[in-house]
Structure formats: structure tokens, C-alpha cells
């Protein structure tokens, strides 16, 4: 009986923790409403600025389209989405 009570307490604590995490996860900035600078890094070296877009998904799509247009396969290139703010061209990097 005691084991069952302890198991129920652990499960309740786990569920409560998940609810708290889910609640606070939605409190951050909406990356689809933010402006990003898009950079591509071909494996041959260097970095190329592709431009400015609104939304993290547009940033990823811009990089993917550029790679496709330049006949680069998966693994032959990488990209960086730089969060643009009033103070910085790259306040935080995203993939």
C-alpha cells in the first residue's frame, strides 16, 4: 500500500512538472514574428549573407532554397538564422 502511495505521488509530481514546463514554454518570444538575418555556410568555406526575413521558418526556407538552387546536397552546407534587434544584427543564433 505504501509503495502505491509513493508511486502516485511521484506520478503527480511528474505531471505537475510537465504542466509547469508547458505553461512557461509558451511565454517566450514568437520567433515567427521576429526579424532574422540569414547566413549560409557552404562546406567549401566562407559565409554568405542571404538577406533579411520575417519568421524563423522563412529563414530556414530561404537557406534551403538557396542550397537547392546552388545544387548543394544535405551535409554540404549549413545555415544560421541571426535574431535581429535594435541593438544587434545577431542577438541570438538559431538553426
Image (spheres, rainbow, N blue to C red):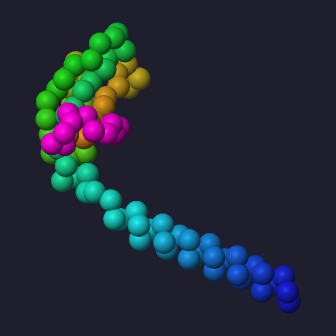
Foreground residue among 29 and 15: 29
Q: Quadrant of the C terminus?
A: top left
Instruction: Please tell me whether residue 14 is drawn above or below residue 92 in the rendered image.
Output: below
Q: Which of 50 and 91 lies nearest the eye of the viewer?
A: 91
Question: Residue placed farthest to the top in the image?
Answer: 44
In the displayed structure, would residue 23 be above or below residue 71?
below
Q: In this view, does 46 lie above or below 50?
A: above
Q: Can residue 50 be seen in this view?
A: yes
Residue 92 in percent (x, y) is at 31, 39
Where residue 1 sits in the image (x, y, percent)? 86, 89
**Which quadrant of the figure has residue 94?**
top left
Residue 77, x across and y down, in percent:
34, 22
Residue at 84% over, 82% down: 3
Comparing 9 with 57, the one in front is 9
Residue 90 lies within the magenta run? yes
Q: In the image, which residues are magenta? A: 85-95
Furthest residue in direction front, as rendered = 87
Q: Is the magenta stretch mostly helix, strand or loop?
A: loop
Quadrant hosting residue 10: bottom right
Amino acid at each position: 500500500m505504501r509503495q502505491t502511495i509513493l508511486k502516485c505521488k511521484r506520478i503527480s509530481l511528474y505531471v505537475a512538472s510537465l504542466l509547469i514546463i508547458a505553461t512557461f514554454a509558451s511565454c517566450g518570444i514568437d520567433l515567427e514574428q521576429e526579424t532574422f538575418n540569414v547566413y549560409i555556410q557552404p562546406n567549401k568555406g566562407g559565409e554568405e549573407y542571404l538577406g533579411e526575413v520575417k519568421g524563423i521558418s522563412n529563414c530556414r526556407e530561404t537557406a534551403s532554397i538557396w542550397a537547392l538552387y546552388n545544387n548543394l546536397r544535405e551535409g554540404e552546407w549549413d545555415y544560421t538564422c541571426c535574431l535581429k534587434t535594435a541593438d544587434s544584427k545577431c542577438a541570438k543564433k538559431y538553426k
